[in-house]
Image: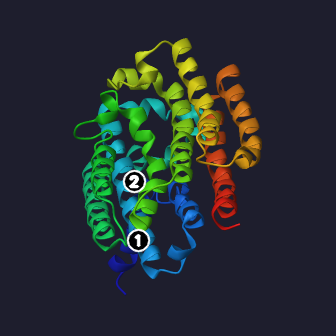
Amino acid sequence: MTVAESSSRPDATSRLKAYTVLGKLAFYDYYLAAFIVVAALPASRLDDVGSYVTLALYFAGYVGVVAATVALDDVTGIRDGSDERNYSPDQGALRDRSRKPLLSGALTVRQAERFGWAAALWGLVLWSLTYVTAPDPPPWAAVVLLVVLLSNVQYSYGLKVSYRGGQELVLLTPGLAVLLPFALIDGSGSGLIVVETILVGLWSLLVSIYSNINDVEGDRLAGRRNLATLTTAAGYRRVVVAVHVLEPLTVAVGIAVGAVPFWFVLPMIPLYVMRFVQARSGLARNEVLRARLLGIRLHRWGVPVLIGLNLLVEHA
């Protein structure tokens, strides 16, 4: 082994780690929806190998879609200066700059762009395979897959959906990681799946809306038009409260229309208690980054709750 070869290996390893960080590949929360889907599938689909092939292809493609979204978002963030402002060193571990390899110089903007487009292509190819090989794909699922891919990849890049008033809608799309694979496997959705799609989408939003409070000044300077930048501080806090209320309201409506049984709400009560703690932390104490962190934890805690409920509803 030459000295040149030996010295290049740490660089290659560091660059690979930087790409992993850029694509948020360690942020697994969105992919936990796979377990929710499996727990909700009818017994007849659980014995079908095609069901698991569809799940694997869908979530492998979704990894690419998410990686493209966050990588290209970082490209825009470094170009307009919003990441430099929003990830100031004084925020410490609650907003770790090491998660932004363009800020640290571990990657160049050109490298990040190439990675983003490669990840988008990966998502497109695998989601196309998902649809054509799925056991019973409804036509509308192809349209939704394409819309999710395009809106996510252009979240802060290209059309800049999040800069033009569409941020909150895109932030709800992780909930579709429940509906889409279920529909591709089973041919349609169900009342239970629709309720859980909305819940998972709200859980995603209940992380980001607190980030937006922290980032509001940087986003305004960058020209991002979202609910936080378009309203007053008091007005946006009312928006946050409304999003919190939507979570139990979704379950209540689901019970009222017969989509879920009346006891569905019982295992959710501890989550609602913690949501109150999250709101108090973020809105009453102005500890918005702590509220954001609690939102991430509640997303993760909510997944086993939905898995258990699905097993009881569908297989008990």
Q: Quadrant of the N terminus?
A: bottom left
Residue at image coords 45%, 41%: 172
Task: Tell me, yes or no, whether the two marked residues, 1 and 2, touch with CB atoms within 8 Å.
Answer: no
- Element marked by disc 2: helix
Point 34% across, 84% down: residue: 2
Eyeballing the image, is 293 above or below 10? above
C-alpha distance separating marks 1 and 2: 18 Å
Which of 17 and 32 lies nearest the eye of the viewer? Answer: 32
* Residue at the bottom extreme, as displayed: 1
> To which quarter of the image does residue 43 belong?
bottom right
The residue tagged 1 is 54
Comes first in the chain, label 1 or label 2: 1
Mark sitting on residue 66? 2
Residue 230: image location, x then y, percent? 40, 17
How many discs appear?
2
Q: Residue at horizontal 74%, vertical 47%?
A: 263
